[in-house]
Structures are given as structure tokens and as C-alpha cells.
Image (spheres, grey):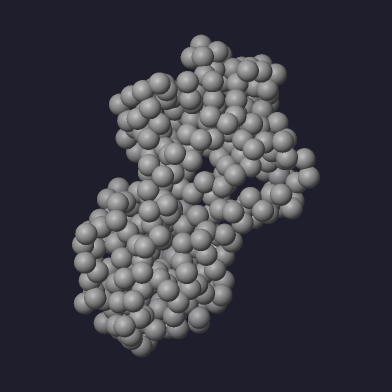
Amino acid sequence: MNICFFTGNMGNGGGTEKMTQLLSSEFCENQNDNIFVLTKSNIKIEPYFTLDEDVKYSILDNGKYVKIFSLIKDVFLLAKYIKNNNIDVLINVDVSLGVFSLPLKILCPKLKQIYWEHFSVLYNINNKRTNKLRKKALKYGDAYVVLTPQDANELKHTYKKINAKLLDIPNISTYQISDTKYNLASKTILSVGNLIKVKGFDLAIEAASKIFEKHPDWCWHIYGDGSDGDEFKQMVKNLSLDDNIKFMGRTNNLTKAYSESAIFVLPSRSEGFGLVLIEAQSYHIPTVAFDVPFGPRNVITNGVNGFLVEPFDTDSLAENVCKLIEDDNFRTTFSDNASKDLYKYQADVVSKQWQNLLQQI
């Protein structure tokens, strides 16, 4: 079988691109399959994450903004690519790519299409363009994959005409469960994510001002970069938290950061899955997150391996982080429970669910 992952831009270093890399590598394990990754545009030329050597990687165009004539051109370029490479299954790694791939229902009628959501379906539920593409993908696609059971239920209640096979498959954990013992002596809070508003780092900084009033000897390391980074850094400066909050930039390897941290905080306003929560739990770290739809509640069991906090309530976020700082028993118990359910996110388990799907469509 010839399977192609169709992506927006593999030059980006986000979770969507990481999952494409991991799943395409897993698919390469099946010697009967040929795996392709086609990126819509890639101004940076090379993928941010290194693809398996057996993956055949291509770029569709030069990455210019879509206008009506370039859209038509790209649809036909995509159809030509599908036919030239005898692609059997196209996995759209973003529902918005349906603008290019939905016309293939006519141009390449034998092609099977899977649409793969990487965000909570509520994140852009009011976006008319996304809603229209999602509606058509659910109607004309062969399968539609979301990250959580709640997302699947939301789509069932929102859209009446669903012909595609709708199912939830979690993301692959990027880390194996660590043998490193939890560092109870650590005084470092850790967060990881793009420095953009939806990731809620402004809310984290608000909470931090309350946390460090009580515990000035602790620090908070934030890994990532993004368009709102300067605003967040200025906020830290205005609150005189420069000595406590450190922006560490982006890195491909967070092993050292996880192994040296005491608490992981995910302050997102919306979170489709919460992959970084799983990464933190792989290192037995207690986790705290806003209980936003739908990812965190699928990873954190409140009061067992972490705390789920009322969304956007920075007082409650600060209070729950302080509970962990002030009670070693809490942290030890949460740490002991952190990795108990992580088997279901291991690569071989997730890949098997995808392989079953490929056999069914």
C-alpha cells in the first residue's frame, strides 16, 4: 500500500509535524507499505523533525499564499502527485488541507482519504471556513480521526451527515517511560509550548506572581518560542519576576529539563490532546492544567496524578501549584501514579490502531 501524509509545512516544529514524523516512521516498519510525506509548502526547505530514511519526502509548491488561481494549480499538482506515485491512501494532517484534497474525490476517485484533527474541535468551531471544510470532510472522506472520545462525540452532535468512519486515536508519546527517579528536591516548575495566546502563558505568569510571593526560592522554566513571546517577556519584567521566570527558548531535546523539574504546568486556553503532559508524566512529574476541552482531562486524573483547575482561574492555578510545593506527600503520590496509564500512548499501540483503520477503509 502506498500511504501519503499531506501536511501544511514540515518546516514548522510543532506537535502536528512531530506526530507526522513519528507515525510515518512507525508505518515504515511494515515492509509491504511505501510511505510518502508531501508538504503543501516549505519555505525552510528541510523538515524541522528528521524523517525516517525510508520516507519519500516532497514539496508541492513554493509556499506562496493561496489565491484562486494558485489554489486551482495546487489541486491539479496534488492530483498529479497522487497519480504519479500510485498513492492509495492520503492522510490529511489538517482538516484545512481539504481545500486542496476534497476535489480529489472527482480527480482521483479510487483514492482513500483520512482527515486527522490535531486540535480540539471546539478550538475553531466558529470559524466558517473550517466548519465548512470539516462538514465536507465528514461527508466525503473515508475516515476522520480525532484525538479524544469527547471530540468524536462533539462532532456527532454537531454534524448530521457523517459518512466517514469517525474514531478517536491518541497521539504517540515522544518519550519512553523514564527510569530516572523523580527529583523531590527540585524547586523548578516547567512549562513547554509555543509562545502564543492560546497556550495561556500570560495566565501562567499571572499565577506565578502569586506563587513566588509565597515561594521566592522556586523558579519557572518555559521552553518554546512564538509570536507573543516578547509580550510575555515584557509581562514578566513588569511584574519584576525576572529572577523567577526564565524563557529557555526552543529545543528538540527536553530530557534534561524534565529530569530536573518538580512540577509541570499546562496553562492552555484550548488543548486538543496535551502531548507535553504525557511527556512530563513519562518522567514521573506531577502535572497541573486548566480543565479545558478536551485533552487534559484524558491525561490527568484529578487528585491522582495531578490537578485539573477551573479554566483561566489563575488564583486556583496558583493555589494548586502551591499545594504541591508545600506537600511532599502530594508530589510523591502524584509522581508514583504519573506513568501508570502511559502504555496506551506508546508508538506500537497507537500505530496498531492506525493499521486497523487502514485495513477497514
On screen, residue 75 versus residue 296, left or right, reads right
On screen, residue 289 versus residue 245, left or right, reads right
Residue 147: tell me if it is visible. Answer: yes
- Where, by quadrant of the figure, is residue 282 drawn? bottom left
As drawn, the residue found furthest toward the top would be 84
Picture layout, residue 84 above or below residue 9: above
Picture residue at 61% right of the left edge, 39% below the top: 144
Q: Where residue 67 sits: x, y (%)?
A: 65, 28
On screen, residue 220 versus residue 155, left or right, reads left
Picture layout, residue 160 above or below residue 285: above
Residue 91: tell me if it is visible. Answer: no
- Where, by quadrant of the figure, is residue 92 drawn? top right
Q: Where residue 71 sits: x, y (%)?
A: 63, 25
Q: Where residue 103 sits: x, y (%)?
A: 68, 24
Using the image as rendered, state which of residue 260 and residue 22 is in the foreground.
22
Picture layout, residue 172 above or below residue 324: above
Picture residue at 52% right of the left edge, 46% below the top: 169
Picture layout, residue 301 above or below residue 319: above
Q: Where residue 41 sits: x, y (%)?
A: 49, 30
Picture residue at 44% right of the left edge, 27% below the top: 37
Picture residue at 31% right of the left edge, 83% below the top: 329
As drawn, the residue found furthest toward the bottom would be 214
